[in-house]
Image (cartoon, rainbow, N blue to C red):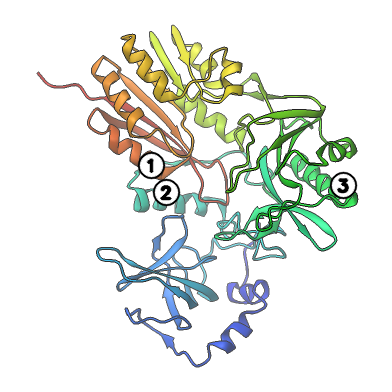
Amino acid sequence: MTHSPNATAAMGQVLPDVAMRRSTTATHPVVKSMLRSVKVGDRIELRANAIGQDGEAVARLEGIDVHVPHLLFGERALIRIENVGREVPERVRRAHGLLLEVLGPIRERVTPPCHDHELQEGRCSGCPLMIAEPAFQRAQKLRWLESAYGLVVSEVVAGPTDLGYRWSSKRVARSQPGRLRLGSFRRGTHQVADMRSCAVDHPDIAACAREVADVATQLGIEAYDERSRTGDLRYVWLKTNGEGDVLVTLITASLETRASELAAALTTPAGVAWSVQPSEGNAIRGATVEILKGCSTLSVELLGRRIEVGPLGFLQPNPRVAELAYRDLCSSSSARLCFDLYAGAGLTTALLGEDCEQVVACDAFSESAEALGTAAESALVFLERKLTEDARPDLIIANPPRSGMGEAACNALLQFSEKGLEELRIMSCSPSALKRDLAHLASGFEITSLRAYDTLPHTPHVELVVKLRARRKKG
C-alpha cells in the first residue's frame, strides 16, 4: 500500500464524476453546522467523530448522524446529503452523505491495492476499510466494538498477511452482455460487482474463479436471474487448502442445469460438486450435494491437524488468523468433562482433547456431525438432553453461527452454571449476536477476558473470543 500524497487530488481521480455531482448541487450553500432542517442536496463540511453500527465513520452532529462511505475516523470532508431518515422518538436521526472532497485527510489514508475496489477501477464495496493502513483499521474496529456494542476488547489480533488471505469465497453469478461474471452484491443492493481481480482471495481461488467464469461464458451458460427466476448458475463456492487444491461447488437454481458440462470443461479445480438452491432470498447452501468431478473433500491442515472439508462444509475464510482464535478458545482447558457446541469438523474437539479428560461434541449440520462420529443435533437439543441426564461439565465451549446461541440455549447454560459449570467460552463472528447472548448470560456468568481477531482485514468483520466465569452465590 502507498500513501496518497494528496487525498483531495486522489479523490478527484477515483471519483471522476465528482465535478458533475457538484454542478448539480451548486444552488445549495455549504452548511457549516448541522441542523434538523438539513435537506437532500445540501453540501456540508463535517468531521468524522464517531463510528456507526456497521463499522463506518460517522459525523455525529446536532440531532443527526451522517454516515459517509469512504470517510475515515478523524477526517474532515465536504459531503452532499443523499438521504435523510425520518425522526423517531428517542433515537438519533440518520442521514447518508456522498463524499465529494477530503479536506483534512489523516496520514493513514492509502490508495486501495485492489483493482476491483469501487475507489479504483471496479465497483466492489466488500472491503470498505481498504482505504486505510491495516493498523488504523484495527484501531477503528476497537472503537466500533465499544461504541456500537459496549464490548470492551483488549486488542484486535492481526494475522500474518492482509492480502490473499481468504481460503473460502462465495461468489454470485450474473450474466452481462457477452459474458458471465462472478462477484459479490454491492453494499445495500442486489447489483453484483465483478471480483475478477480480488486482492483478498487466495491466488488459487482467484485463478479458479476466473476459469469458471471464462468457461461458462464460452459454453454460453446463463446465470440465474432472481427477478425473472430464469437461468442456470446461481452461486459458486470456492475453497482451497493453501497447497494448490481448490474444491468448487456449483450451485444452481434447479435440477435443469448444465453444471455437469461446465465441470467437465474445468481444469483448475481438484474437485467439482453440484448443489441446488431453489429458494428465494440469499441462502447459498443447498440441501444435498453431488460430486461431478475429482475429489469429494478438501484436506486442510489447521493447527498441525488434517481435517476433511466437504463441498457444503464450513471452512474458516482466514484459517491462519482462525488458528490464533482457536488456540485462545481452547487454551489451558484442563477439565474433567467438556462440551464442545457447534463443533464443526472437530478441530476444537481435537484441541480440547489434549487437556480435557472427556470431550463431548455436537453440531446440527449433518456433514459436520458425521465427521464427529455423532448424530446431527442442535446445541439447544443437546444441552436440554444433557440436563435431563444430569451431566455436570466443568467447561463448555461454543462457536455459534452468526445468529448467535439465542435465549433458550443461554437459559440452558445458566442451568449448568447452577450445577457446577466453572467456565464458558464463546467464539463469535457477530458482535450484535454476542452482545445479546452475553445479556442473557449476565445473571450467571462474568467476563474474564475478551479479544478480537482480524479475521477479514479491510472489512469491519472480526472474530471474538470471550471467556466467562460462572458466578457463585454467596453464603
Query: In 3D space, how far apart are the residues under numbered discs 1 and 3 (Cα atoms)?
Result: 46 Å
Disc 2 marks which residue? 142
User: Disc 1 marks which amino acid?
Assistant: Val
Q: Is residue 363 above or below residue 41?
A: above
Which label's residue is closer to the chain start, 2 or 3? 2
User: Disc 2 marks which amino acid?
Assistant: Leu
Location of the C terminus (image quadrant):
top left
Q: Is residue 261 above or below residue 384?
A: below
Query: In 3D space, how far apart are the residues under numbered discs 2 and 3 (Cα atoms)?
Result: 43 Å
Query: In 3D space, how far apart are the residues under numbered discs 2 and 1 (Cα atoms)?
Result: 7 Å
Q: Residues within 10 Å of mark 3 (few under 14, many from 20)?
A: some
**Percent position of residue 300, x then y:** 68, 25
Which one is nearer the viewer's eye here, 103 or 376? 376
Q: Is residue 151 above or below residue 49?
A: above
Which one is nearer the viewer's eye here, 361 or 18? 361
Tell me, yes or no, whether the two marked residues, 2 and 1, touch with CB atoms within 8 Å: yes
User: Disc 3 marks which amino acid?
Assistant: Val
Q: Residue at x 39, y 70 (%)?
A: 85
Disc 1 marks which residue? 153
